[in-house]
Image: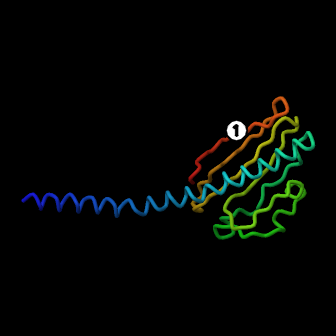
Amino acid sequence: MWWRRVRYVLLLAALCAIATCPAAKRACTANVRSQEAEDLLGYLAEKVTLSYLANGKFPQGAGPTPRPSCCDQGGTCSPDPATWAAPGWQQLGFTIDDEYRYTYEYIPDPSGTSATLRAVGDVDCDHETSLYELKLTVTAGQVFRSWKKTDPYE
């Protein structure tokens, strides 16, 4: 008698696992794909910071790049050096050499005391975008970072 109850519990657990498996896979995939934005904005922040420390001012702005968005290009953007040929990207020495899913932008503040790095993307092309912003602020000759993430796994 107890075996029947255990069977039903095991069957229920198996059904729950099967039902949640696709959702878990989608969440994991979105998490992995969103890591691109954090990694590349962190790398770009290093480039901007080094340029600021060497020259005493933020370099000229760049982006948004690419246009049209990666979803308009089939979901991912292919690496193309011409995409990153704008003077601002060239001044920073920034290119992306692998497939990517976000549109990147670098905006220095006219006051010269801050800059914003931005990645906007729709990793699953469902018309719901995520936004990553990394603000660089100069205080007493040092560059500080602050992150803002809006819908990071969309």
Percent x, y of residue 53: 87, 41
Say left or right for 86 vs 10. Answer: right
Q: Is residue 22 left or right of residue 50?
A: left
Residue 102, located in which quarter of the rendered image? Answer: bottom right
Which residue is the extreme one toward the right?
55
| Residue position for label 1 | 146
Instruction: Say if 2 sits above or below 48 in the image.
Output: below
Q: Residue 56 location, x and y as percent?
A: 91, 39
Q: Quadrant of the N terminus?
A: bottom left
Q: Determine the residue positioned at 38% across, 59% down.
A: 20
Q: Nearer the viewer, residue 124 or 91?
A: 91
Q: Residue furthest top?
A: 140
Measured from the top left, where is residue 121 in percent x and y?
Answer: 65, 56
Q: How is the image coloured?
A: rainbow
**Mark 1 Cα shell of 10 Å, populated few (<14), some (14-19), many (≥20):** few
Q: Quadrant of the C terminus?
A: bottom right
